[in-house]
Image (cartoon, helix red, strand yellow):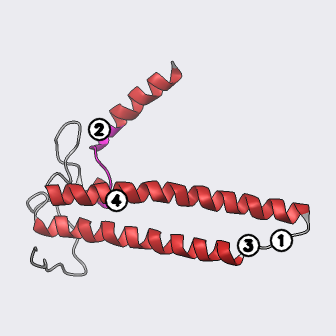
């Protein structure tokens, strides 16, 4: 088991320190775990809310409106379920020592990008190329 890494509350990864050192990895690990915990808490609230709102509504318009709201909520939760899988994959990459490096080019992903989107797997340039190719093939 690894020793706990001290990380000040105001710590932010900086460009002038070694890339993906223990402090940076711990920073992103904690950020990912907090994000996952937040999503799971919201999911529990949704489940509780849906249990509470299960009732027979006689007015058809009100029932349709509630069913639409429920469908939107379930679609949001499904997207978040997929996001949790990406967070788990990022946590595995941290454990494997692959986190922070582009899966296409092997180059370091910028700290600003990782801070904004900690599940990023590609550099901004590689992501843009990927999206352009995807758009071209989608138009075919």
> On screen, 134 above or below 9?
above
Q: Is residue 118 visible?
A: no
What is the distance, in whole Å, between disc 4 and disc 1 at their CAs? 38 Å
Residue at the extreme right: 59
What is the distance, in whole Å, between disc 2 and disc 1 at their CAs? 52 Å
- Kindly identify which residue carries mark 3: 54
At 23% across and 36% down in the image, what residue appears?
104
Give the structural element (helix, strand or loop) at label 2: helix
- Kindly identify which residue carries mark 4: 87
Dot 1 crowding, Cα within 10 Å, few <14, some 14–19, many 20+: few
- Nearest to the observer: residue 122 or residue 43: 43
Mark 1 or mark 2, which is nearer the start of the sequence?
A: 1
At 36% across and 54% down in the image, what residue appears?
86
- Kindly identify which residue carries mark 1: 56
> On screen, 103 above or below 42?
above
What is the distance, in whole Å, between disc 4 and disc 3 at their CAs? 31 Å
Q: Nearer the viewer, mark 4 or mark 2?
A: 4
Can you say which quadrant of the picture contains the N terminus?
A: bottom left
Magenta region:
115-127
Residue 117: say if magenta. Answer: yes
Q: Nearer the viewer, mark 4 or mark 1?
A: 1
- Kindly identify which residue carries mark 2: 125
> On screen, 102 above or below 139?
below
Mark 2 or mark 4, which is nearer the start of the sequence?
A: 4
């Amino acid at each position: 088991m690894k020793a706990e890494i001290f990380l000040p509350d105001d710590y932010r990864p900086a460009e002038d320190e070694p890339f993906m050192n223990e402090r940076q990895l711990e920073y992103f690990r904690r950020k990912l775990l907090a994000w996952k915990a937040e999503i799971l808490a919201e999911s529990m609230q949704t489940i509780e809310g849906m249990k509470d709102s299960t009732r027979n509504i006689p007015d058809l318009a009100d029932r349709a409106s509630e069913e639409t709201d429920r469908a939107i909520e379930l679609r949001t939760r499904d997207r978040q379920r997929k996001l949790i899988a990406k967070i788990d994959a990022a946590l595995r990459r941290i454990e494997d020592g692959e986190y922070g490096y582009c899966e296409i080019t092997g180059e370091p992903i910028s700290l600003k990008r990782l801070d904004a989107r900690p599940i990023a797997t590609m550099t901004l340039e590689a992501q843009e190329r990927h999206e352009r190719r995807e758009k071209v093939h989608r138009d075919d």
